Image (cartoon, rainbow, N blue to C red):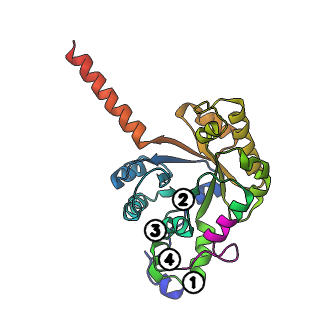
């Protein structure tokens, strides 16, 4: 698959996606969300055994250099990164991939037309028209030929779209049939907000959408993901979800700090 020049350097191989390799074997995968911009927390989570670190660029004001350091911190431990991008132009979508993120997640997909445009911007030929530059980490800094780079990127990097609104449900079958989209990820929090019931994650419409997303995705050969608390992991896996995000740095640091302060208060007050 690789050129003779690339084969002459045993360590010089593009990194396969741990997520895709696991999912294609039928194994569920687990991710951990970062709201902080600290690469050390990415390292800590990676060392714990998560399959992927979810880095948020939708709600977190990290710059591109910080993002690159977080991706590199996870890669040291052979852990993937999923970058939830800020919705914008093609540069917002491809820069995390060029920094060698294993996946990008596009929030609030609203229609089949938008999904088609995402594939056009993010995927290389023959699926799309992604701008071509092999001089970054994902192209081994020009150590791969153009043909190798395109083939590897299309096969080993994941495009995830989030269903967080009721509008795309009417076109969900067509979205899930679209080549170039790998995973449909259901966001219950924003979905509950979109239907006017913020935070009601067990609202009947949220429950219905959660089941519809996983059933439709799996029926069309797409992977399905969602968020889950620890208590809901078994239920979501039984429902058919294959990627679950459980835990985030801000909540775990907060709970750890609260526990220490509580223990100190109990000790100090006898």
Q: In the rendered structure, are the residues bearing label 3 and label 2 in contact, judged by CB atoms less than 8 Å apart? A: no
The disc at residue 99 is 3
Q: Residues within 10 Å of mark 2 (few under 14, many from 20)?
A: some
Nearer the observer, 203 or 236: 203
Looking at the image, is mark 3 or mark 2 earlier in the sequence? Answer: 2
Can residue 237 be seen here? The reply is yes
Q: Which residue is mark 2?
A: 18
Q: What is the spatial separation of the Cα atoms under label 3 and label 4, in whole angstroms? A: 9 Å
Q: Residues within 10 Å of mark 1 (few under 14, many from 20)?
A: some
The picture places residue 102, in percent across and down from the top left corner, at: 53, 62
Q: Which residue is mark 4?
A: 139
Q: In the rendered structure, are the residues bearing label 2 and label 4 in contact, judged by CB atoms less than 8 Å apart? A: no
- Residue at the (58%, 65%) spot, across then down: 157
Occupied quadrant, residue 159: bottom right
The picture places residue 259, in percent across and down from the top left corner, at: 33, 27
Q: Which residue is mark 1?
A: 146
Looking at the image, is mark 1 or mark 4 earlier in the sequence? Answer: 4
Image: magenta residue range:
117-132
Which dot, 2 or 4, sits closer to the camera? 4
């Amino acid at each position: 698959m690789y050129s003779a020049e690339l084969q002459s350097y045993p360590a010089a191989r593009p990194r396969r996606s741990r997520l895709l390799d696991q999912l294609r074997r039928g194994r569920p995968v687990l991710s951990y969300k970062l709201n902080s911009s600290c690469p050390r927390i990415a390292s800590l989570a990676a060392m714990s055994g998560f399959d992927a670190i979810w880095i948020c660029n939708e709600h977190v004001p990290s710059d591109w250099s910080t993002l690159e350091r977080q991706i590199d911190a996870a890669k040291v431990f052979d852990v993937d990164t999923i970058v939830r991008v800020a919705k914008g132009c093609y540069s917002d979508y491809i820069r995390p991939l060029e920094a060698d993120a294993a996946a990008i997640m596009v929030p609030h997909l609203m229609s089949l037309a938008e999904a088609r445009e995402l594939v056009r911007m993010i995927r290389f030929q023959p699926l799309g028209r992604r701008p071509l530059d092999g001089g970054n980490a994902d192209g081994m800094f020009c150590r791969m030929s153009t043909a190798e780079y395109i083939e590897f990127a299309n096969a080993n990097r994941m495009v995830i779209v989030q269903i967080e609104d009721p509008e795309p449900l009417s076109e969900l079958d067509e979205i899930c049939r679209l080549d170039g989209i790998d995973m449909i990820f259901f966001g219950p929090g924003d979905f509950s907000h979109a239907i006017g019931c913020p935070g009601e994650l067990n609202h009947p419409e949220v429950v219905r959408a959660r089941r519809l997303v996983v059933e439709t995705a799996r029926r069309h050969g797409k992977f399905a993901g969602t968020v889950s608390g620890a208590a809901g992991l078994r239920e979501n896996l039984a429902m058919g979800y294959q990627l679950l995000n459980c835990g985030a740095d801000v909540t775990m640091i907060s709970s750890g700090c609260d526990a220490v302060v509580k223990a100190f208060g109990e000790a100090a007050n006898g």
